[in-house]
Image (spheres, grey):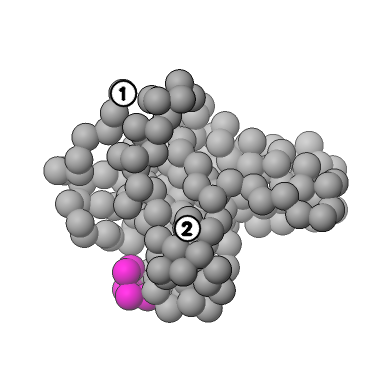
């Protein structure tokens, strides 16, 4: 199903997956206007076993999804780094971040970190400070409590700008 242009208000959640902190940010889009709805992070205790931390991420995101009722979701893709074990664990957190909205019947899109930076800042290698500055311009009411929440808002904004091309690509590749 190809998403239609936004004529009515549409609520989007962006999710920045992580084992220590999974950021989330919810925006509302109407036409070209972006509105801040909420943001925060799910922070499972570091001393818990991996399975318990993944469960805490799922439960936290499920609560956010239930409270804010987004209609579409976007998750940042994992980049592979030199530490394979860390990349694998991040991939597990990312799987949970994709599963939670899917369990609510919400379509999930994925975006590369460089595309998120390019969309929000205009440069694919922007730093966290540049993202924060642009978020203040794009969503003046937003006060993200962490970098993860700020990144999640940036992911939601990226989805708002690229959602139709992402849906077309999914349709073409049969994803």
Give the image location of residue 38, x and y in percent: 40, 58
Q: Is residue 134 left or right of residue 90?
A: left
Give the image location of residue 113, x and y in percent: 55, 56
Give the image location of residue 168, x and y in percent: 34, 32
Q: Is residue 73 left or right of residue 54?
A: left
Other residues around mark 1 within 10 Å, as few (<14) / some (14–19) / many (≥20): few
Secondary-structure class at tag 1:
loop
User: What residue is disc 2 on?
Assistant: 116
The correct choice, above or below, for 139 with respect to 114 in the image is below
Residue range corresponding to the magenta coloring: 136-141
Give the image location of residue 115, x and y in percent: 48, 56
Name which residue lies at 37% across and 56% down.
Answer: 157
Q: Nearer the viewer, residue 107 or 126?
A: 126
Q: Is residue 20 left or right of residue 134?
A: right
User: What residue is disc 1 on?
Assistant: 1
The stretch drawn in magenta includes residue 140 = yes
Q: Nearer the viewer, residue 175 or 73?
A: 175
The correct choice, above or below, for 99 with respect to 163 in the image is above
Q: Is residue 4 left or right of residue 170?
A: left
Query: What is the distance, in whole Å, between disc 1 and disc 2 at their CAs?
Result: 24 Å
């Amino acid at each position: 199903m190809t998403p239609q242009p936004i004529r009515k208000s549409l609520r989007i959640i962006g999710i920045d997956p992580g084992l220590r902190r999974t950021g989330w940010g919810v925006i509302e889009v109407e036409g070209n206007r972006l509105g801040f709805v909420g943001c925060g992070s799910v922070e499972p205790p570091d001393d818990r076993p991996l399975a318990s931390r993944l469960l805490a991420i799922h439960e936290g995101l499920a609560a956010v999804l239930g409270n804010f009722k987004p209609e579409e979701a976007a998750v940042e893709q994992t980049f592979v780094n030199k530490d394979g074990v860390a990349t694998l664990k991040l991939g597990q957190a990312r799987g949970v971040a994709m599963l939670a909205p899917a369990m609510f019947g919400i379509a999930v899109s994925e975006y590369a970190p460089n595309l998120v930076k390019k969309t929000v800042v205009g440069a694919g290698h922007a730093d966290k400070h540049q993202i924060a500055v642009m978020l203040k311009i794009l969503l003046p009411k937003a006060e993200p409590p962490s970098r993860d929440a700020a990144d999640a808002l940036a992911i939601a904004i990226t989805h708002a700008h690229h959602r139709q091309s992402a849906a077309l690509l999914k349709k073409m590749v049969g994803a």
